[in-house]
Image (cartoon, rainbow, N blue to C red):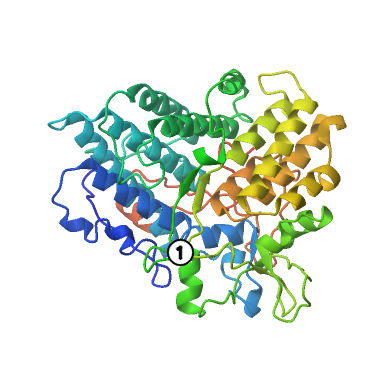
């Protein structure tokens, strides 16, 4: 794969991902500079554009049933029923292996082997690459990894288990490589942390926690590693969160906004509240309802309703809010609330620690508070919800308390399609997941979608691609 050099992601005609974003690498094929920071920034921009755009956010949100298409009244039934465009699949694969992965590996090579060693730059690139590789295997399963971005023309596909274990080693190496006394680091091109290495370390350690929590059900031996991370300096405030910024300026807007702005005159004609999210929220009178959703065109003020996947919406059905799809909405890769939900789960399940439902409740309550604060819910409404509506899990059984944790974690991830898809698959045994998704009407028989097909170009161009292809309903290694 190393022979595939710096080229942009092939973007779907309707949904551009980065265009002239911040004027970074307008023509990546013409790059003459060997400054690794430019490669890092282009990778980061391409990555954020894919996560928030039509190639990732929308199809995953539909298939994971966190967004409703509204059927023929809205977006149509295609993605609901797992009819994913080959461009969607291929563009996302290309992002992770070319625009993202290849550029980051080139940057690492330059930073470590160029005229001037730039250890901090290499570490920043390695940590971002680890997140991208994690996402790649969460989407596709077994993928090229150990031979990817090398001189091997036909890299072998590695198992998800092997990849996840090696990512932990890579993150440890990146953390160890960081030198706080070395001023050389990516600052201007680091659109997330502006060269703050302390925050990069927190993100790297939090990413380790995310990976271990994903692995735990299939490899309980990582429990001690998870427990050890509880005493580490993880993402510990909203200021530490990994947020990619978008702006209310031409070509720098969030891709969700750009879809509606360019093709619907700024209105939301296509994306609706899904019952798999809304029903949980309505049951608790969640104050995020008017933040997440706008009333349907024909609904009374303050009247909200949702629709199931692959079901016709109508004029009263609530829509995903224009607040979530505003131009300057950041792309959230890792939030403080996510760390708190993980901690709540750890104590509810007794992962490397004794079961402690009181401590689990404390973290669970803090996580919900942080989640609501992030979405700018009024402080008085948050306080009222925490005191009156949020279930107190301190006196519940671990099983019942864990379900409440997963419900709130799922609600928090509604607008983060990929992260929500990972969370829903890891939230319980099949049939006991949160939510318990059902096969949409009209979707192929076999089960809900648990993985994407491999990109056609990879299958046709790599002689080491699997000859027996998995079904879209086959579980990935981590998915118990």
Quarter of the picture containing the N terminus is top left
Residue farthest toward the front in the current orientation of the protein = 380
Query: Mark 1 packing: few (<14 Cα in 10 Å), some, or many (20+)?
Result: many
Rendered location of residue 122, percent (x, y): 29, 33
Rendered location of residue 442, percent (x, y): 66, 68
Rendered location of residue 454, percent (x, y): 44, 52
| Image position of 223 (left or right of 302) | left
Say which element carries label 1.
helix
Foreground: 371 or 5?
A: 371
Q: Is there any visible trace of residue 296 in the rendered image?
A: yes
Q: Is there any visible trace of residue 474 in the rendered image?
A: no
| Image position of 165 (left or right of 223) | left
| Image position of 58 (left or right of 287) | left
Task: Please name the residue shown 80% across and 35% down the image.
Answer: 401
Asked where in the image residue 353 lies, by quadrant, the reply is top right
Q: Is residue 118 above or below residue 288?
A: above
Asked where in the image residue 444 lies, by quadrant, the reply is bottom right
Question: How many circles with numbers are drawn on the protein?
Answer: 1
Q: Is residue 163 above or below residue 418?
A: above
Rendered location of residue 456, percent (x, y): 38, 58
Foreground: 193 or 232?
A: 193
Foreground: 5 or 218?
A: 5
Foreground: 162 or 45?
A: 45
Quarter of the picture containing the C terminus is top right
Task: Please name the residue shown 65% across and 43% down the image.
Answer: 370
Q: Is residue 38 above or below residue 178?
A: below
Q: Residue tagged by mark 1?
A: 255
């Amino acid at each position: 794969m190393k022979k595939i050099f710096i080229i942009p992601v092939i973007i779907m005609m309707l949904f551009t991902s980065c265009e002239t974003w911040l004027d970074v690498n307008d023509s990546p094929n013409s790059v003459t500079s060997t400054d690794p920071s430019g490669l890092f920034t282009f990778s980061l921009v391409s990555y954020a554009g894919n996560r928030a755009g039509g190639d990732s956010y929308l199809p995953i949100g539909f298939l994971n049933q966190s967004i409703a298409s509204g059927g023929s009244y809205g977006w149509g039934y295609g993605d609901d029923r797992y009819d994913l465009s080959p461009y969607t699949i291929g563009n996302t694969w290309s992002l992770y292996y070319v625009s993202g992965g290849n550029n980051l590996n080139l940057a690492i090579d330059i930073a470590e082997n160029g005229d001037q060693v730039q250890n901090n730059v290499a570490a920043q690139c390695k940590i971002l690459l680890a997140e991208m590789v994690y996402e790649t295997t969460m989407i596709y399963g077994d993928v090229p990894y150990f031979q990817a971005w090398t001189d091997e023309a036909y890299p072998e596909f590695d198992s998800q288990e092997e990849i996840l274990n090696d990512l932990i080693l890579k993150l440890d190496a990146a953390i160890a490589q960081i030198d706080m006394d070395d001023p050389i680091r990516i600052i201007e091109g680091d659109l997330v942390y502006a060269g703050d290495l302390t925050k990069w370390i927190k993100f790297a350690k939090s990413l380790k926690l995310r990976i271990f929590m994903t692995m735990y059900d299939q490899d309980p031996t990582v429990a001690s590693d998870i427990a050890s991370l509880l005493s580490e300096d993880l993402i510990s405030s909203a200021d530490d969160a990994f947020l990619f910024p978008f702006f209310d300026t031409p070509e720098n807007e969030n891709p969700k906004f750009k879809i509606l702005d360019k093709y619907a005159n700024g209105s939301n004609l296509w994306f609706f509240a899904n019952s798999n999210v809304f029903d949980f929220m309505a049951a608790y009178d969640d104050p995020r309802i008017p933040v997440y959703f706008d009333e349907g065109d024909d609904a009374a003020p303050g009247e909200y309703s949702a629709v199931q996947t692959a079901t016709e919406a109508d004029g009263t059905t609530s829509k995903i809010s224009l607040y979530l799809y505003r131009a300057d909405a950041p792309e959230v890769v890792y939030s403080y609330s996510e760390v708190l939900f993980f901690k709540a789960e750890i104590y509810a399940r007794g992962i490397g620690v004794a079961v402690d439902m009181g401590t689990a409740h404390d973290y669970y309550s803090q996580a919900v508070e942080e989640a609501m604060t992030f979405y700018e819910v009024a402080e008085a409404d948050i306080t009222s919800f925490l005191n009156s509506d949020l279930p107190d899990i301190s006196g519940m059984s671990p099983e019942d308390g864990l379900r409440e944790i997963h419900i709130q974690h799922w609600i928090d991830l509604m607008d983060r399609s990929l992260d929500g898809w990972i969370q829903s698959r890891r939230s319980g045994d099949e049939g006991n997941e949160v939510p318990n998704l059902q096969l949409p009407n009209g979707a192929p028989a076999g089960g809900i979608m648990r993985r994407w097909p491999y990109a056609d170009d990879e299958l046709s161009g790599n002689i080491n691609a699997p000859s027996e292809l998995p079904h879209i309903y086959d579980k990935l290694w981590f998915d118990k």
